[in-house]
Image: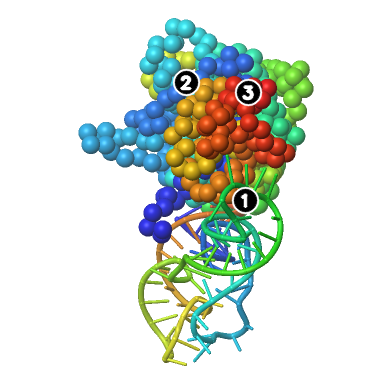
Amino acid sequence: MEKLRTVRGVHDLLPQELYKHQQVINAGLKISDKYNYSQVETPIFEFAEVFTKPLGNSSDIVTKENYIFKDRSQDELMLRPEGTSGVVRAFLNAGLVQDIPQRFSYYGPMFRYERPQKGRLRQFKQLGVECLGLSSWMADIEVISLGHDFLEQLGIIENINVNINTLGDIASRKKYRDVLVNYLNDFQYKLSKDSLKRLSINPLRILDSKNVEDQKIIKNAPSILEYLNLESRTRFENICKGLDHLNIKYNIDKNLVRGLDYYCHTAFEFTTNELGSQGTVLAGGRYDGLSKMLGGSDIPGVGWAAGVERLALMIKSEFTNKIDVVLIGQSENFNYLLLPIMKKLIQNGIKSEIIYTGNLSKKFKRANKIKASYAIILGEEEVSKQVFKFKDLKSGIEKLINLKQAIKIMTK
RNA sequence: GCGGGUGUAGCUCAGUUGGUUAGAGCGCGGGUUUGUGGUACCUGAGGUCGCCGGUUCGAAGCCGGUCACUCGCCCCA
């Protein structure tokens, strides 16, 4: 018992829980399809560069959270830590640059070597969408709208906050970065260790530090919104306007930045405070530089990914396995006669189970336990009369009828 | 990677300051019921007290280590 278990942060999914995941995934794929995002699937492992190049060497995902290994031909492979890079790589490989825009949805397991927590596993599922080939801000709005509809479908949107920010284009960000570093330099002695490290590597990330002392400093830091060039600013304003048109409520969070290097312009997060510290349930943004980082041509893109497990923790629907009918033989000799009957029932879309073992009392107990609505009982008497006994397990009423009649009752 | 909490039956949990055969409820098996369930009653099975080591005459309870879960940090979906 102790010897055989799953590895840390990796869980089995039994019907109860898997059902919820399925609810999330089905809702996500369905609404994505309505927005004309077609489902794709990419491998769960890739050459490591597919992820290391775009994610950037300073990101935690690359430096400490990856599952990286060499296979027997000494290729450096990585279990995918996120979905976007793989989808964009597939898009480039398929030559779809010739046929833009492309809208994709996907879901599947991702892997990150992190300390497990509620809503944070080492193998977890993400469902995401990517809109490739459109630099128009309309695509940003579309994608956020899709995410919003998704969570609305799941019935959890009232517990969600939408936060949005812009990182600007490269020029704006560079300008802002200098201003920010200049500002933060004055507080070097007060910054947390981590933030101090980031001051030279990735100063924007300091903005979403949760360290209390850092936050005091950040509070008065200059805002990127003041350093956007005209193009970046109008883009952001137009997106906000678009969300207003859709009646999507959002907060502008000037400290919202993304951990991954390939993001630019729009960044957004859908968060909840129902899940403790792992409150981000869906997040994404624009990643115009990604395609080029992967060695492709300059293809803009925008998208998001949602945490299936986190969303599953929020939905209420419960799994109940109800069965239409059980087939019961008076003794084991009758079991083989039940098989063709069951086959007919199944062909008519009736969920069935033959209860093979036990005396009649046991069989009915099981019928009850598995929440069967009806029972078909076959014994000597029935066989001689060419019928079977059909019992409504709710009312307890029994009658002798044939298969056709039984199917009629159960399919209406 | 860092810090706090937890680990006793399939599940939820009791277990006094270390002291005989470690308990309950639910669930599971058998029976009351030789062609009939849900209720009720009777009865049974199931635990190396996470694992390893130490202290002790004696450890589920104390100490150390380890593993897992959990909460927070980091980071992220």
Q: Residue at x 63, y 23 (%)?
A: A405
Q: Residue at x 74, y 19 (%)?
A: A246
Which residue is labeled 3 in the image?
A: A405
Q: CA distance from mark 3 to mark 2?
A: 45 Å
Label 1 CA crowd tier, 10 Å (few <14, some 14–19, many 20+): few
Disc 3: which chain? A
Asked whether, in this view, residue A205 is left or right of residue A254, the answer is left
Residue type (three-letter) at the residue carrying disc 1: Asn
Q: Earlier in the sequence, mark 3 or mark 2?
A: 2
Which residue is labeled 2 in the image?
A: A40
Residue type (three-letter) at the residue carrying disc 3: Gln
Q: For marks 3 and 2, give the one nearer the viewer.
A: 3
Pointers 1 and 3 within a single chain = yes
Which residue is labeled 1 in the image?
A: A211
Q: Position of residue A44 (x, y in %)?
A: 40, 31
Q: Is residue A141 above or below residue A365?
A: above
Image marks 1 and 3: residues in contact by CB distance under 8 Å: no
The foreground one among A352 and A223 is A352
Q: Is residue A48 above or below residue A367?
A: above
Q: Residue at x 51, y 28 (%)?
A: A341
Residue type (three-letter) at the residue carrying disc 2: Val
Asked whether, in this view, residue A156 is left or right of residue A327, the answer is right
